Amino acid sequence: MTFFDTLYKTVRAIALPLLVFLLAACAKQGMPGGGPKDVTPPRVKSITPENRTLNFNGKQFYIEFDEYVEIKNAENNVIVSPPLKNRAEYKTKGKGVIVTLHDTLSPNTTYLFQFIEAIADFNEGNLLPSMEYVFSTGDYVDSMSIRGKVSDALELSPREETVSVWLFENDKYGELIASLSDTIVKAPRPDYVTRCDKQGRFSFNSIKPGSYRVVAIQDEDKNTKIGPMESVGFCDDILESRNMRDSVKVDSTIRCVADEKAAEVFIFTPEQKGRQRLTSSAFVAKGKIRITSLLPLLKPTLYSGSEQLKYIMNKTSDTMTVWTMREKCDSILLVVSDPSGIQDTLNLRWRTKRAKDKGFSVASSGDGMSLSSKSPAYFDTIALKFTTPLEVAKCKTDSAVAIIDLKDSSTTFCDVVIDSTEMYARLEYTLRQGAKYDIFVPQGSFVDIYGHANDSLRASVTVSSKEDYGNIKLHVASDGTSALIVQLIDEKKNVVRQQVMKGGGDAVFLNIRPAKYKVRVVVDTNGNGRWDTGDILLQRLPERVVYIPQTLNVRANWDFEETITIE
């Protein structure tokens, strides 16, 4: 054997195993990683006893799925109609859920179990949106239905919070109303219960024939009773159940062909008449106290012995900011009274951990005074704002501020007017559209209640122009005589502007900042100039509201004109 033959055999002996190893490694790297993620919810394979069982007399039923499952918050996500006095027990067993009843079932009654996002697969947590199980303790299964939609009475949109819906037989509904004013009268339990989906829709299925009244509620304490603070809604029509046999299923909601229109229910938060109270009170800085109330304060009075006090109210009159004349005051015994129903004694102490805001006085840091806006509107004025009330008698209001017009460098020394809150000083100067100004406030021009004078202030402002805004003109036609409140609503649901009119007319909103707005019209039935909520005890619905369907995208130098008809 030659040298080359020996070398060839040696190389072959080493190379072949190495090649096999490399190919195996490559093959291993190329193997699939388990396939696509499972996004399919569990599927029901069987139910024992089967769905729509008659003459049910057991204590359990079992739902088997095609995979292992877990139960999600059964207390809130499984709804039983008619309601059970004792909660059922829900446990997983194998690839299913076993439900144990701890109640004596009523004879000749159809029971409906609604599992709404209550079942999820064990591995991926995919939720089964909804499923229903029905059985009857009698010879037939009730097959009637009532459907509807719940909307917020003012926003006309579904509530984000969970809304329960109760159904009462018509003669029992009177007992419910009576129980709201008389604690001796026991509130009846609903005949049927369900809850709204995210679009506010609801349906009562498998109910017996009859006439019903519907109530919607945010039952926050889950006690199946209407609490004084809970949002509630009702339909003032008597609802007749419809036959489900000719029904179709759309978006998981059973809709009956015989139904022409779903029941409309508007949910509202009732006015808290006679329940006025202080909701919070605390030092927010030494010498500064903030007090809030549930309802607006009418004419509050404060008393603290020899301690001198000063306060201002916010725009809604439910928040009061109080200053003690002693700057470093850190404890106080304060008596607060108001005709709205307040008579409280507060024992308050300053706690360091509550300190979130600093620089409340017009101190040498200069934090106590600033311009209210560096881009004032052409139809407005330039204003200075302060963080502590001013001692008006010690302030220099005559020719205190210099305004330099940058167009021609002319200087004007103008007077200032301190407003009633003593927190703002407005400059008496007529602004020119699009103009740019330098503002100079001399040191010591303003003094606060603690004797602190301001530092000097130099700032520049640019005034807006008429072309920076849009205008809206609305022709409101109404065939009624009620007063109408036309409101412009921003994206944060704040009322930006409003106009009151009698039975229709033109609502004109000028100089609107570019943004997106909705237009709302309140039918002010009692003419008190505001939207009034409802009262279930008095069976009074909330005042009606109407929205323009489209959102107004107001642009600069843009005019919008629209007609609204209120029937």
Image (cartoon, helix red, strand yellow):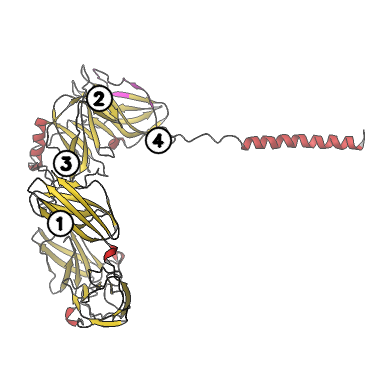
Name the amino acid, label 3.
Gly
Residue picked out by circle 4? 126
Quarter placement of the N terminus = top right
Q: CA distance from mark 4 to mark 3?
A: 33 Å
Tag 4 secondary structure: loop
Residue 74's place in the image compared with 45, above or below, is below
Amino acid type of the residue tagged 4 in the rendering: Asn
Q: CA distance from mark 3 to mark 2?
A: 27 Å
Which quadrant of the view contains residue 515?
bottom left
Q: CA distance from mark 4 to mark 1?
A: 50 Å
Q: Which mark is residue 499?
A: 1
Tag on residue 529? Answer: none
State the separation of the CA atoms marked 2 and 1: 46 Å
Mark 2 vs mark 4: in front: 2
Which quarter of the rendering shows the C terminus? top left
Magenta highlight range = 41-61
Is residue 304 magenta-colored? Answer: no
Would you place residue 17 above or below residue 328 in this image? above
Of the numbered discs 3 and 1, the one sitting upstream in the chain is 3
**Residue, x 17% and y 48% (percent of image)?**
564
Q: Quadrant of residue 16?
A: top right
Of the two numbered discs 2 and 4 on the same chain, state the one appearing first in sequence: 4
Front residue of 383 and 184: 383
Residue occupying image coordinates x 27% and y 66% = 351
- Disc 2 to disc 4, C-alpha distance: 29 Å
Residue 62: give x, y in percent of width and height. Answer: 34, 24
Q: Is residue 102 visible?
A: no
Q: Earlier in the sequence, mark 4 or mark 1?
A: 4
Give the foreground label among 2 and 1: 1
State the residue position of label 3: 233
Q: Nearer the viewer, mark 3 or mark 2?
A: 2
Amino acid carrying label 1: it is Gln
